Amino acid sequence: MRAAACATLLAIAAGLPHAGGRPAVPRVTVHAWVENERGLPASDLQLEEFEVLVDRAAVPLEAVVPRRAMSVVVLLDTSRTVPWSTQTLPRHLGQFAAALPPDDRLMLATVGGRSTALPFQPAKHDLQSAIRQALNHEEGYGNTPIWDALHDAVTLLAREPPPRAVLLLTDGRATGNRYGLAESADHAMANDVSVTVVAKHIGRQILQGEKTAVLVQPWAPLEAVTRYTGGQFFTYPERQEEAAVTLFQGAAASLRGLHAFGFTPVQRNGAAHRLEIRSKRPGRIVHAPLAFVAR
Amino acid sequence: MLAALTMLPPQAPAQEKATFRSGVQTVMLHATVRSDDGHLVPDLTRDDFEVRDEGQPVEITVFSSDPQPITVVLLLDMSGSMERHFLRVRDSTRHFIDALQPGDRARIGSFGVEVALSPWLTSDKRILHRVVSEELWPGGGTPLWNSVYGAMQSLDRESGRRVILALTDGIGNMDLPGLEGSSRQARDKAEDDGFMVYAIGVEGSPLDASITSLAERTGGGFFKLETGADLSRTFLRVVEELRHQYVIGFAPPKADGKMHDVDVKVKKPRMTARARKNYRAPGGR
C-alpha cells in the first residue's frame, strides 16, 4: 500500500500520467528533446512515434509528457586561459536566461578563478552583473577542475526535482580534478542531468618528430559528455554577435523542449544500462541520454 | 613546522627504520651513494659513513639502508618549447608511474599556461594514469618557480622525505599573477623545510642554474638528456636512486635556529655520497 502511494507520488512529481486506484508507474524517467526536420524542438510528441531500446532490446514506452519547471546550473570557466568578453558573454547569458520559461530556476557557479556559487534564482533574474563580476579578476592561473565542478553541480541539482541541466562554458582544459571525466559524466547520467557545453574552440596539431603529430583538442571530451547525457555541444563563435545570439537561443530552446520519457526496464539492478530512444517519424532526431541507471 | 618536518627523534638501534619516535630531536638526511663507475651502492653500514656539522664530526644516531618509500611531486613542463616532446613526456611519465611500488605516493603537476597540481597524492596508479591522460595541456611560458614552490606547499603536511622532481627544457622565465614562489622563495623553503629537489633537463636550452644548484644543495640531483636520450630510463634512474637512499640521523650539536652546513662522506674509496648540504637547527625560529 505504501509502495503504491509512493509510486503515485513519484508519478505526479515526474509529471507522468497516473491512475487513482492502480498506478501504472514507469520505473525510469529520462528527459530528452526531439529535433524536428527544421532543426527546432518538436512539441507534438506522440507515444506511438517512439521506440525505446534498453541494452539493444525494445521496451514499451509508457509516457511522454512535456517537462515541468527545471533547474539549470550555469557553470562558467573563469580561468585566465579562457578569455571571455566581459561585455558580450554576460549579455548572451542574460538572453539565454530570458529565453527560459519563467518557472525555471538558474544558478551561476564558476570554476578556475575566484569561486562563485550563487543560489538558485528564477531564470528571469538578472545574472549579468554577477557574471561580469566573476569575469573581472586577476587570479585564475592555478587548477581548473572542470570535472570536479561538474560533479558538484550535478550533486546540487540532484536535490532539485527533475528536469535538471548544466550549461558549461569552458575551453575544456581540465586540471587538478579529484574526479575524472568519466566519473563526472556518469554522475550526471545517473541523476538525469543533461550537460550542454559552449566551448572555446582550441584545437591544433603539434608535430612530434618527423612522422608523428599529436592533435590537441580539449573540447573533444566535452562533446562526448554532451552526447552521453543528452545535452548539446556548441562552439562559441568568437566575435560573431549574431551567431552567438543564435547559439544561446538554440541552447535555451532545446531545454524548453525537453520531455519526460517514462518506461519500465526489465531489470532493476541499480546498474547503468545502454539506452536509445528513436523517433519513427522521418527527419526527427531524439536527443536523449545514452544510458540510465535502473533503480 | 620545521621541527615537525626535519627534526625527528631517534630510537634504539635495534628498531632503526625510517620512522622514529619521541625524545631528542634528530636531523634526518637521505644520502645517495654511487661508485666511481656510476652504480648505486646499496649495502653500506653505519660505520661506512662520516657526517660533519660545520666541519665537526657528529655521531650518527639513526641509520637505515632499507628501501625507502617515495613521496614525490612530479612536475612536467608543458610550455611551448616542450610541445615537440609532448608524447615522449607523457609516455615516460606512464613508465614512471608503473615503476612506483605500493608504499610510494606521487602527485602529478604541470606548468605552462597555468600551474596545475593534482589534488591526488596517491599510490593508486589508475588515478595517476587518469591524470596523465586527462590533465596535460601543452602551451604557455615556463613558470618553473611558481610550480616548484606550489609543489612544495602541496607536501607541507607530509612527513619524512619529500621529493620534487621537475622535468623541464630550460629556464623559469615567468611568474604567473596570483601565484607565490620566486626562485629565492623556493630555495629558502626547500632548505628550511628539508625538501629534496631533482631536475631532468630535456635537450634544448640549458637547465636553469638555480634549479641545478637547488638540486645539489638539497641532496637531490639533476640529469641533462642528450638528443634522443631515453627519458623513461632517466625517470627510472631517479626512482631507483630514491628507493636506495640511506637514512642517516644525528643530534644537532647546537639549537641556535641557524642554517648549518652539513657534509656526508663515505669512508670507503671510490664512492661518493650525495645528501643535503645544510639544515636549519632547531630553536630561534
Image (cartoon, helix red, strand yellow):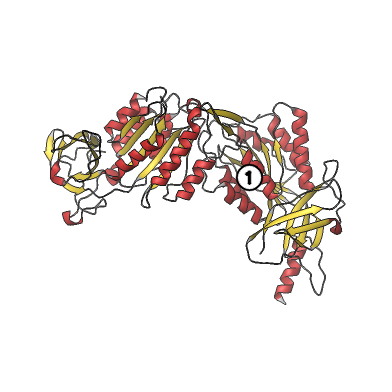
Image spot of residue A286 (x, y percent):
78, 49
Q: Is residue A163 above or below residue A144?
A: below
In the visual, does A293 lie left or right of B95? right
Q: Quadrant of the C terminus of chain B?
A: top left
> Is A281 left or right of A290, judged from the image as shown?
right
Say which of A97 and B16 sits in front.
Answer: B16
List the residue tagged with mark 1: A118
Instruction: State whether residue A259 appears in this view.
Output: yes
Q: Secondary structure at mark 1?
A: loop
Dot 1 crowding, Cα within 10 Å, few <14, some 14–19, many 20+: few
Q: Quadrant of the N terminus of chain B?
A: top left
Which quadrant holds residue B214? top left
Position of residue B32 in the picture relative to residue A38 (left or right)? left
Please give the name of the residue rendered at 81% of the width and 67% of the height, measured from the top-left corner.
A18
Give x and y (percent) for residue B166: 39, 34
Farthest bottom residue in view: A1
**Residue A244 x, y percent position in the rendering:** 74, 32
Q: Disc 1 marks which amino acid?
A: Leu
Towards the viewer: B67 or A150: B67
Locate residue A247, reporting x and y percent: 75, 36
Q: Decide if residue A194 is in sight here.
A: no
Numbered label tally? 1
Q: Which residue occupies the extreme front position in the image?
A: A211
Parent chain of label 1: A
